[in-house]
Amino acid sequence: MPKLVTPPQNLDVAVIAHDGLAMFEFSIPVEVFGLPRPEFDPWYRFAVCAVEPGPLRATGGIRIEVDGGMELLETAGTIVVPGWKNLDEPAPAPIVEALVRAHARGARLVSICSGAFLLADTGLLAGRRATTHWTHAERLQRRHPEIRVDADVLYVDEGQVLTSAGSAAGLDLCLHLVRRDFGAAIAAQVAKRLVIYPHRDGGQAQFIEHPATARAGGGLGRFMDWLGGRLAEDLTIDAMAREAGMSRRTFLRRFQEHAGMAPHAWVVRERLSRARVLLETTDRSVETVAFDSGFGTAATLRHHFRRAIGTSPQDYRRRFRMAS
C-alpha cells in the first residue's frame, strides 16, 4: 500500500454541527474523514462538536448526537464548517473564539458552501482569496469587503484556511486535503470508493453557463477524446479546428460552450494534470516529464507550475512523491 513519505502530524478532524444542519454538506466530511478505512494506516480520527447541547435537528427529520463541545477544537488538526444556517446573523462568539485559537496554534480551517460566512466572521479570511456557493458570493463580498471572493472556482486553498463552493464542491476540497496529506494514490482510492472523479482542480469553474451536449458541434465529445490522447503533440488552434471539422471561429465558440474555457487553457490544464501524475508516481526527470506531458521544456513546465500551482515541479514532487 503506497504511503506518503512524511505522514501528516495531526490527523484529528472535528466537524462543527448546529441546529438546522444541512445533511448533504455535513455528510461530505463524514464520508471522507469519518468512515473507518482499515486499508489505510494511519487514517483520520473523526469527531462532531457543537455549541448547542443537542440532540441537534438536521434536514430530513434527522437528529444528531455530538461528541462534545468547543473543547474538541482545541486539539483538532483540521476543523470543518459544513455550511451555516443563517447568513444574516453573525457567528456565535464561542465558535469564533475557538476557531481563532485553533488557527493560532496551526490547525487547518475548512468551509463547505455557506460555511465560509462563519470563517469570514472570525476575521481570518481578511486579505485572503475565498469562495462560497455562487448564489451567496455577492452577499459574502458585501458583508466582508476585505475578502477577495472568487465565485468562479470549486475551492480555494490558502494553506491553513480553505474554502469550497456549494455542496458537491466540498467533496473536491475534502479529497484535495486527502491528496495533501497522503498523496494522489490514496486520494484516488478514496475517490474510487466514492465513485467520483479523483481530482478536479480548484480553479475549475463552478458551472458552465450554456453546457453543450457530448456530441454538440459535430462531435466535440469524440474530438475531446482525440485531444486528450495527443497532449504531447504541438496543438495549434487551426489543427484542432480541422480535426473537429469546423472553421476556426466556430471551433473556438463551440469549444468554449462545451468545456467552459478556451482550447489553450483546457490543454494547459490537462497537461498540468498529466505532469502532476508523472511527478507523483514516477522517477522521470523534470525534463522528461515536461516532454511527456506536452510542455516541451522544463522551463515551460516550471512556468506553468508556478502560475497555476504556486510551486516548482521539484517541490511538488517532494511534497507528493509516493513510496511503495
Image: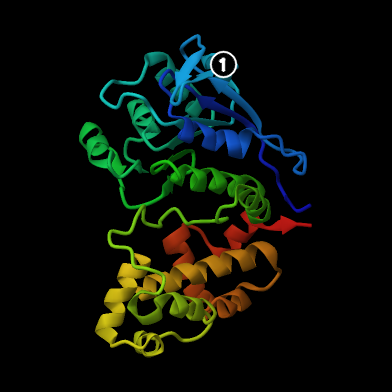
Residue at screen point 54% across, 43% down: 174
Taking 317 as reference, is 275 above or below it? below
Taking depth in this image into account, of 216 and 281 the one nearest to the observer is 216
Point out the residue furthest to the top here.
53
Taking depth in this image into account, of 229 and 77 the one nearest to the observer is 229
Q: Position of residue 72 (x, y in %)?
A: 58, 19
Residue at screen point 53% across, 37% down: 28
Give the structural element (helix, strand or loop) at label 1: loop
Res. 124 in view: no
Taking 269 as reference, is 181 above or below it? above
Image quadrant containing the C terminus: bottom right
Taking 240 as reference, is 167 above or below it? above
Point out the residue furthest to the front here.
61
Image-quadrant location for residue 43: top right
Res. 271 in view: yes
Q: Position of residue 241 (x, y in %)?
A: 35, 86
Would residue 241 appear left or right of 43 to someone viewing this image?
Answer: left
Q: Position of residue 54 (x, y in %)?
A: 50, 11
Q: Position of residue 224 (x, y in %)?
A: 45, 76
Residue at screen point 43% across, 37% down: 112
Would residue 16 appear left or right of 146 to someone viewing this image?
Answer: right
Mark 1 belongs to which amino acid?
Glu
Taking 172 as reference, is 60 above or below it? above
Residue carrying label 1:
65
Point out the residue furthest to the left here.
142
Q: How many marks?
A: 1
